[in-house]
Image (cartoon, helix red, strand yellow):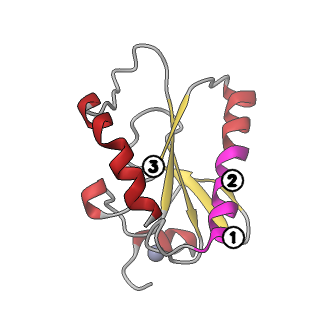
Amino acid sequence: MKNCIFCSIAKGEAKSWKVYENWKVCAFLDINPANKYHTIVISKKHYTNIFDIPPTELKEIISVVKKLAKIYEKKLGIKNIQIINSSGAEAQQDVFHINFHIVPRQKGDGQDIRWEPHPEWTKEYDRMLKRLKQ
Ligand SMILES: [Zn+2]
């Protein structure tokens, strides 16, 4: 896709620090890292997000996420990571080319992602499940 930074990175047209690539997927260090080795994993082909990517392509990405997690564990001793995908602007997707973040975490790193919990919504779960089955 034209003017897509991740397509440009996948094609090698934009500067990036690639940690891994195969014929379907590439992974590179985030230029705005939350931690050292914060990595973005993308499909080389342009898909917007979870809603339009075919399951087979998604499997290729997640396999690379797994591979890198194991490499980071083995070579860097990283034992804690967050894997984050945002799909849609209101879900805080900022680059509209499917991507998974691998964010290594450690005690005292100053990072925090927390949602505001709403335990009172469990009262609606029976009704919510009914809606899914309609
Ligand atoms: Zn793209």
Q: Residue at point 69% right, 45% down?
A: 66
Nearer to us of marks 1 and 2 is 1
Residue position marked by numbered label 3 in the rendering: 30
Number of the label disc, if any, that sits on residue 25? none
Cα–Cα span, label 3 and label 1: 25 Å
Total numbered badges shown on the rendered structure: 3
Asked whether mark 3 lies closer than 8 Å to ligand 1, one says no
Query: In the rendered image of this protein, does residue 86 appear above or below residue 117?
Result: below
Residue displayed at 51% across by 68% down: 9
Cα distance, mark 2 to mark 3?
Answer: 16 Å
Q: Is residue 75 left or right of residue 2?
A: right
Q: Secondary structure at mark 3?
A: loop
At a point 62% along the width and 64% down the height, the residue shown is 58
Majority SS type along the magenta span: helix
Which label was assigned to residue 56? 1
Left or right: 114 in relation to 72? left
Residue 134 picture location, percent across and down = 43, 67
How packed mark 2 is, by other alpha carbons closer than 10 Å (few <14, some 14-19, many 20 or more), is many
Q: Amino acid at mark 2?
A: Val
Of badges 2 and 3, the one in the foreground is: 2
Image-based side of 30 in relation to 72, left or right: left
Outermost top residue: 108
Q: Amino acid at mark 3?
A: Asp
Q: Earlier in the sequence, mark 2 or mark 3?
A: 3
Provide the residue designation for mark 2.
Answer: 64
Give the percent coordinates (x, y) of residue 112: 33, 27
Kindly indicate whether the residue at mark 3 contacts the one at mark 2 (C-beta within 8 angstroms).
no
